[in-house]
Amino acid sequence: MDLKTLKTFSLAGALFLCCAVFAGAVSAQPAPKQYVADFGAAFTQATVTKARMGMLGLDLSVGKMIIDGLSVGIAVGHDVVSYRKNGEIHERLAIVPILAKAKYYYAIAPSMSLHASVAGGGYQTIPHLGTDEIGGVSRAEIKPGAGIGLGFDYWLFGSHGFGVEFEYHFIDTGGEDLFSYCAARLNYSIIKM
């Protein structure tokens, strides 16, 4: 096979692959009455006084598309927002959000969308700390709070998506300042009828 023929077959193969991906992606946006489930892993970091290095967060959210572009549902997670190893002791502060969440999708291409989210609910604090409190949190309790987020999704073959998201959460601890933390998240999404 000569170089010209190889180049022609390579170009044809690349064109076929692009057509296959984008053909599957034409309907790859959530539509009304469908469910969207997001599974995510994140780097989380508290943004308050005495916070240590952040760590891993995991989350699950499920929403139903109620109109074109808007889903409402629930979200739960487990975010370790401050971690420090002090000798043999692992000091950490974990937050478990249990939230009602609304997410608006804005399609920028057949297979790509931006989204914005807003959530509110309860945040269970789980401190395993030494003697220091972090941002007004020193004991386990459920506190009210909210979160906002922005993200990008790439939808593939009509039902699977991969995305990135940045979230900012703030919690009322009863003190003068709000407790807050950020999450940079990678998501895997599934659309179901």
Image: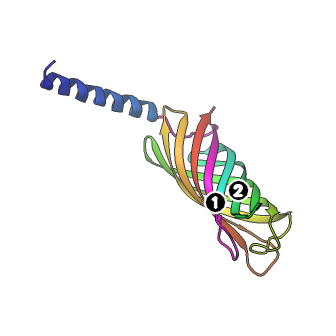
Q: Where is residue 128 drawn, in percent x and y?
A: 81, 62
Number of numbered discs overlaid on the protein picture: 2
Decide: few, some or many residues near mark 2? Use Cα within 10 Å; few <14, some 14-19, many ≥20: many
Q: Amino acid at mark 1?
A: Thr
The residue sitting at 53% across, 47% down in the picture is: 163
Location of the N terminus (image quadrant): top left
Q: Where is residue 149 drawn, in percent x and y?
A: 60, 59
Instruction: Report the span colored magenta.
Output: 26-53
Tell me, yes or no, whether the two marked residues, 1 and 2, touch with CB atoms within 8 Å.
yes
> Taking 89 as reference, is 156 above or below it?
above
- Tell which circle, 1 or 2, labels the residue nearer the N-terminal end: 1
Location of the C terminus (image quadrant): top right
The residue sitting at 45% across, 35% down in the picture is: 25
**Quadrant in the rendering for residue 141:** bottom right
Circle 2 residue: 79
- Quick check: is 51 in the magenta stretch? yes
- Quick check: is 191 in the magenta stretch? no
The numbered disc on residue 149 is none
Circle 1 residue: 44
The residue sitting at 53% across, 54% down in the picture is: 151
Decide: few, some or many residues near mark 1? Use Cα within 10 Å; few <14, some 14-19, many ≥20: many
Q: Mark 1 and mark 2: span between their CA atoms?
A: 6 Å
Q: Amino acid at mark 2?
A: Asp
> Taking 130 as reference, is 36 above or below it?
above
Of 128 and 161, the residue lying toward us? 128
Q: Where is residue 191 drawn, in percent x and y?
A: 60, 36
**Quadrant in the rendering for residue 85:** bottom right
The residue sitting at 13% across, 25% down in the picture is: 4
In the displayed image of the protein, which residue is found farthest to the top? 1
Q: How is the image coloured?
A: rainbow
Q: Secondary structure at mark 2?
A: strand
